[in-house]
């Protein structure tokens, strides 16, 4: 799974992005790649907490598309209990500021990457920093 995500992100990076911009997400600096209506958030500078969870520069957190002022797609959670990131569906809005807020519900995992039966609703907030 990780290899296919890395291949996907390298493939996207090989294409020319219309605009790259940088965003804060929980102390990590994220790169937003804009390919027409397609959107990809990757880690540019992961926070120490995310590095401890195994996140590296270029890892994909969200890929999807923009329609109007809404984003739809797949986010990933990086768990200390799992070797690979775990995908789940999210959607949300683009706000002035600018800010992007994505919400999705996912399974929670315990040691050994075993689902523990609980559902978690994540709210991913991206706040604009600058353009490239």
Image (cartoon, rainbow, N blue to C red):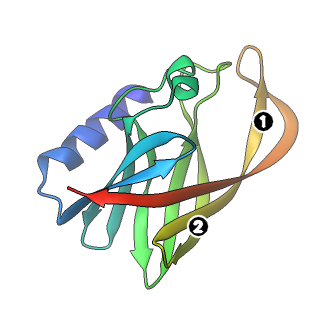
Where residue 59 appears, as percent x and y from the top left, is: 39, 35
Name the element at disc 1.
strand
Q: Nearer the viewer, residue 78 or 113?
A: 78
Q: How crowded is mark 2: few (under 14 residues within 10 Å), some or many (20 or more)?
A: many
Going by the picture, which residue comes out furthest to the right? Answer: 117
Is 55 situated left or right of 14 in this image?
right
The answer for how far apart the CA atoms under marks 2 and 1 are is 19 Å
* Label drawn at residue 68: none
**Figure check: 45 above or below 96:** above
* Label drawn at residue 91: 2
Where residue 79 appears, as percent x and y from the top left, is: 64, 26
Instruction: Say which quadrant the C terminus sits in.
Output: bottom left
Name the element at disc 2.
strand
> Marks 2 and 1: CB-CB under 8 Å?
no
Residue under numbered circle 1: 108
Residue at 17% from the left image edge and 59% from the top image edge? 17
> Quick one: label 2 or label 1, which is nearer the N terminus?
2
Where residue 31 appears, as percent x and y from the top left, is: 33, 49
**Figure check: 7 above or below 105:** above
**Figure check: 25 above or below 58:** below
Going by the picture, which residue comes out furthest to the bottom? Answer: 68
Residue at 57% from the left image edge and 43% from the top image edge? 26
Where residue 88 appears, as percent x and y from the top left, is: 61, 49
């Amino acid at each position: 799974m990780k290899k296919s995500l890395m291949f996907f992100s390298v493939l996207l990076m090989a294409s020319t992005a219309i605009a790259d911009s940088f965003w804060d997400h929980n102390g990590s600096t994220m790169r937003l790649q804009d390919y027409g209506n397609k959107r990809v958030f990757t880690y540019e500078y992961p926070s120490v907490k995310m590095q401890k969870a195994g996140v590296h520069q270029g890892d994909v957190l969200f890929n999807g598309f923009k329609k109007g002022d809404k984003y739809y797609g797949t986010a990933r959670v990086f768990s200390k209990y799992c070797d690979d990131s775990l995908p789940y569906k999210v959607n949300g809005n683009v706000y002035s500021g600018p800010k992007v807020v994505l919400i999705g519900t996912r399974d929670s995992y315990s040691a050994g990457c075993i689902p523990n039966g609980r559902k978690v609703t994540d709210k991913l907030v991206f706040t604009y920093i600058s353009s490239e």
